[in-house]
Amino acid sequence: MSVRILALVGSLRAGSHNRQLAEAAVKHAPEGTEVELYEGLAEVPFYNEDVDAEGSVPAAAAQLREAAGRADAFLLFSPEYNGTMPAVLKNAIDWLSRPYGAGALTGKPVAVVGTAFGQFGGVWAQDEARKAAGIAGGAVLADAKLSIPGSVTRFAEIHPADDAEVVTSLTEVLRQVTEGVGAAAA
């Protein structure tokens, strides 16, 4: 049985280094692990409990929930915007946290990684994403971390999928997520 990991990228920019990092996860997923890069977070409206009712959930939010429901685990990619995670990633977490106590994140392993221009690689944003995912019911893997600083210079001429150090670290995170799925099923 293959482990299905849903990758959510907190940057909507086409040339985003975090998107490239997610592409590297898809490319270098270990055997028996499938990483699906979710497309469509830009279309998901801001969470509003008034429209989160049977028959009125916006199609883009319903599609996100369906994809998350098929996933065994989650890998969140977060840049750092003004010291915290981007709104698009927080919004996805909010939609996946509902219905309360039974959202698509509930009980499933979640790892948060990312890259940012600053010297700490977006660690503040990643910590905030871990906090939000945990409160939303996800089984956050506290030791599955990867924060890559200096993204603008580091990835100016090389895609993360071709950076041996990044691939090694990212593959380790994917291994931890896959083991987290096994532990959750036990």
Image (cartoon, helix red, strand yellow):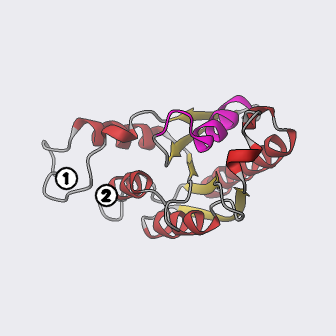
Please name the predominant secondary structure of the magenta segment in the image.
helix
Pointer 1 local density, CA inside 10 Å: few below 14, some 14–19, many at least 20? some
Q: Quadrant of the N terminus?
A: top right
User: How far from the left and from the top, in percent, is residue 184?
Assistant: 61, 57
Name the residue at 29% across, 58% down: 99
Pick the residue in front: 8 or 29.
Answer: 8
Name the residue at 52% across, 44% down: 9
Q: Quadrant of residue 27?
A: top right
Pointer 2 local density, CA inside 10 Å: few below 14, some 14–19, many at least 20? some
Secondary structure at numbered mark 1: loop
User: How far from the left and from the top, in percent, is residue 2?
Assistant: 65, 33
Q: Is residue 112 left or right of residue 160?
A: left
Q: Is residue 35 visible?
A: yes
Q: Quadrant of residue 94?
A: bottom left
What range is drawn magenta here?
A: 13-28
Secondary structure at numbered mark 2: loop
Residue 17 among magenta residues = yes
User: How far from the left and from the top, in percent, is residue 175?
Assistant: 76, 47
Q: Is residue 118 left or right of residue 88?
A: right
Q: Is residue 92 left or right of residue 52?
A: right
Q: Is residue 160 above or below residue 149?
A: above
Q: Which mark is residue 98?
A: 2
- Callout 1, which amino acid? Asp
Name the residue at 31% across, 58% down: 98
Q: Separation of disc 2 and disc 1 at Cα?
A: 8 Å
Name the residue at 55% across, 42% down: 7
Q: Is residue 1 visible?
A: no
To which residue does mark 1 refer? Answer: 52
Q: Quadrant of the C terminus?
A: bottom right
Pick the residue in front: 101 or 92.
Answer: 92
Q: Is residue 126 above or below residue 54?
A: below
- Residues tagged 2 and 1 counted as in contact (Cβ below 8 A): yes
